[in-house]
Amino acid sequence: MTDYLQAFNYALDTWKVDVIVMSFGYSSRRTYPLFESALPRARKLPDNKEVLLFAAASNEGGNSLPTYPARFDNVFCINACDGYGNGSGFNPNPLDKGDNYCILGQDILAADPHVMVSGTSYAAPIAASLAASLIEFVGQNWPSGDLSMGRQVMEELQTHSGMRRLLDGIAKKGKEYYYLCPWAELFRGPNRDLGEICHDIRRIVLG
């Protein structure tokens, strides 16, 4: 865990990242107190910047709850699903309170085209990539006549609370998990006006 802590701090201090993905887990929060104590640093950076944190829920199935760090406050807990949005059998039991998101993490084509991989450790970076892509989408496509509002939306999306509102808004809510599927809420067809999509994001994030 010392290596994880060093990598976490290096990503914050040297790379100055916007998103961190943690595709690992441990069952007891008392196991690595130093790592837990470092997590708040992601919300106390200069210029009121926050770093979005995503973590794999675990692959222990119904015998367990999500592991840490996915269970910590202000960390997005990511479960896996198949290509149809059905929760994977290896997902842990959902949390009573907290994030229960799922995204593709089953039967993914690996770098080796002959290998398929599955796990919440694969779902977590896909969810983080979705979040980063949504932020970039707003930055690239916000209508030029309202740039101050675009900056406000961008700043809010770079907070845990703002991104959580957007993820909740684009998810299909099942019995156990929130299935992240932006094409259903935002990208309804290939010909939708980009400005309209940006304003839908504003409505979800800012109300």
Image: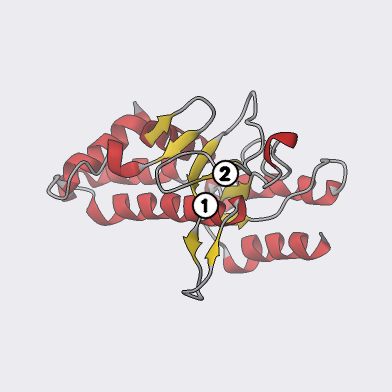
Q: Amino acid at mark 1?
A: Gly
The residue that label 2 is drawn on is: 78
Residue at the (43%, 41%) spot, across then down:
85
Q: Quadrant of the C terminus?
A: top left
Q: Position of residue 61 (x, y in %)?
A: 68, 40
Which residue is at the front of the view, 26 or 60?
Answer: 60
Q: Is residue 15 left or right of residue 205?
A: right
Among all residues in the image, which is located at the extreme front?
A: 114
Which residue is at the front of the view, 104 or 49?
Answer: 104
**How far apart, in angstroms, are the residues tagged by discs 2 and 1?**
9 Å
Say whether marks 2 and 1 touch (CB < 8 Å). yes
> Relative to 160, is 5 above or below?
below
Q: Taking the image as drawn, is residue 84 in sight?
A: yes
> In this figure, which colouring scheme has been used for the structure?
secondary structure
Residue 4 marker: none
The residue that label 1 is drawn on is: 105
Q: Secondary structure at mark 1?
A: loop
Mark 2 vs mark 1, foreground winner is: 1
Among all residues in the image, which is located at the extreme right?
A: 31
Residue at the (18%, 48%) spot, across then down:
194
